[in-house]
Image (spheres, rainbow, N blue to C red):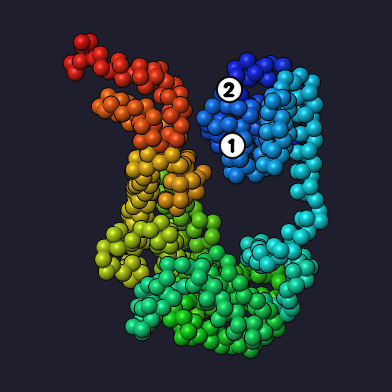
Amino acid sequence: MGMYRVLLADDEADVREGLLSEIDWEACGFTVAGTAENGLEALELAQRLEPDVVITDIRMPFVDGMELVRRLKAESPLVKTVILTGYDEFDYARQAVSLSVDEYLLKPFSAASLTELLHKLQTRMELEIAEREDMRKLKEHYHTSLPLLKANFLSSLLHRKLPEPVIRDKARHYGLSLEGEGCSVSVISLDSAAAEAELPAQAVQSLRTSPDVDLKLFAVLNIAGEIWEGREFGTAFIHQDHVVLLGFGKTDESWKERLQNALEHIVRSVEHYLRMPVTIGSGAAKGGLSGIKSSYDEALLALDYRLVPGTGRILFIEDVERRGSSPLLLDELRQQALSRCLKVGTPEELETVLETIFGEIRAEHASSGIQLYLSEVLTTVWRTAQSSDVDMEDVLGAGFQPYAELVRMTGLAEARRWITEMCGAVMGKISGKRQHAYRDLIEEAMSFTRERIHDSDLSIPMVCSHLHISAGYFCGLFKKEVKLTFLQYVMQLRMERAQELLRTTELKAFEIAERIGFSEPNYFSFCFKKHTGSTPKEYRSRMKDVSPSGQEG
């Protein structure tokens, strides 16, 4: 464990300086992260520095030590607090125990007594850390987390080729039955709005119109799981944006027929009960459990063919993939490279990725194989654009049929030129949307802040709640775009507004403080002088002595 971080708060400068100079903090296992001369400054520093321990005087301006402890514990329950108090406040300090104050020390105190207290506090903190790692508690947490762990295990089978004994051992551990000579994986995908248009008009107000993808997947899982497990095929679960069906059994001649019947039943039932169209990609049956990943990859590959004319709602990899001595496939790595490049790459990187993709095409490949390969490229571009909220009609034009265009093309050079131009246009659209979204978000934050500059409760959590984003993401983006932290921006706004009111009104300092969001007039005066070098009274007096032309009157 590294050094614990300490924040010191005392309104007496000699006390702060004495604490800094007379205590060997590192020898006690601590480092002083910052000092504050009043309670409000201590709160601001605590939010920014996130100390492990706060040592505070009990009597301070703006916010006293007791109130400081209460607010700190509300925001950071794990922070340790130490109260410093005089003899006449002894009873007051004892009440602090009920507020979860960890220690208190009577003034005057020696360096030795504070050092002893710090050692005691360090020992307690280390014991608490050890307790959180206690095996018994970990086991209790493990059992409550078992459903999530089970889902994570099933998901891991789709991405890692594990030895069969390892898979069976872990399956028994999670209470899963993966018995059978072989296995196969099928993947259910929610269809696009174009496919939904084929459904009856009464479906318009159904679940399919909901923007909640997780809710849709859960509804599909309920139906598919009941059918799948009812026919004793295996298990069903949600992985990323799909419902995955793991099937186990004797993969003989009747396997595919039984499998197709079950999948057709699922498609019909989902459309009947949920009014939602789905497409299922199914990988080939494998001879053992170690083939789960391979079958899953094939199922996803089969799904990539769903937009190609002539395919149905259930796509078996054996039906849609041309088998030959030299198959032409856009593997997952190249798909990921192309997608990443469209989202955050440069034109030079895009050219390199496309060179690699087209370099795979050789003269011996049949034209149908090349068309399917380029369809995979187009599908990757289409999926990337869709995930980035880019409308492909804005790129290709309304009513344009890209897959029909690929079939029409007879020259590889023509296809490459068209795909390169399309990728460049998509890349530009994504980049533009991202920058515009950043600017809109920050402008909304600044507008919200200006409207509430009078609110003393204005804070980062309040703004983030309004914007529906996390505090960490907001703070980083705000500083990048505005070149100020959010707290610096708020203080700047308040100081500018204060100066305006001092120049243009006769409001008293406490009235101005209230209008710009300071609950404590004295703290407003403290901040104003820190910002401008003058007290509010001095600033107003100086402004009155200056004529509109800038000459002293």
Q: Which residue: 52% across, 76% down?
A: 219
Q: Is residue 78 visible?
A: yes
The percent position of residue 344, horizontal first and vertical second, equals 44, 47
Which residue is located at x 60 percent, y 79 percent? 225
The amino acid beneath tag 1 is Glu
- The kind of residue on which mark 2 rests is Asp
The percent coordinates of residue 113 (x first, y second) are 78, 23
Residue 226 image-quadrant placement: bottom right
- Residue ranking furthest to the left: 549
Q: In this view, does 418 lie to the left or right of 191?
A: left
Above or below residue 298? Residue 385 is above
Number of residues whose C-alpha sits closer than 10 Å to that of mark 1, classed few (under 14), some (14–19) or many (20 or more): some
SS under mark 1: helix
Measuring from the top left, give residue 249's x and y in whole percent. Answer: 70, 82
Residue wearing tag 2: 11
- Front-most of residues 32 and 304: 32
Q: Which quadrant of the figure contains the N terminus?
A: top right
**Residue 297 position within the rendered picture, expressed as x and y whole percent measured from the top left:** 58, 67
Compared across the picture, whether 151 is left or right of 553 comes to right
Helix, strand or loop status at disc 2: loop
- Residue at 34% x, 43% y is 451
Q: Is residue 50 visible?
A: no
Residue of label 1: 67
Quarter of the rendering occupied by the C terminus: top left
Q: Nearer the viewer, residue 304 or 272?
A: 272
Residue 290 circle label = none
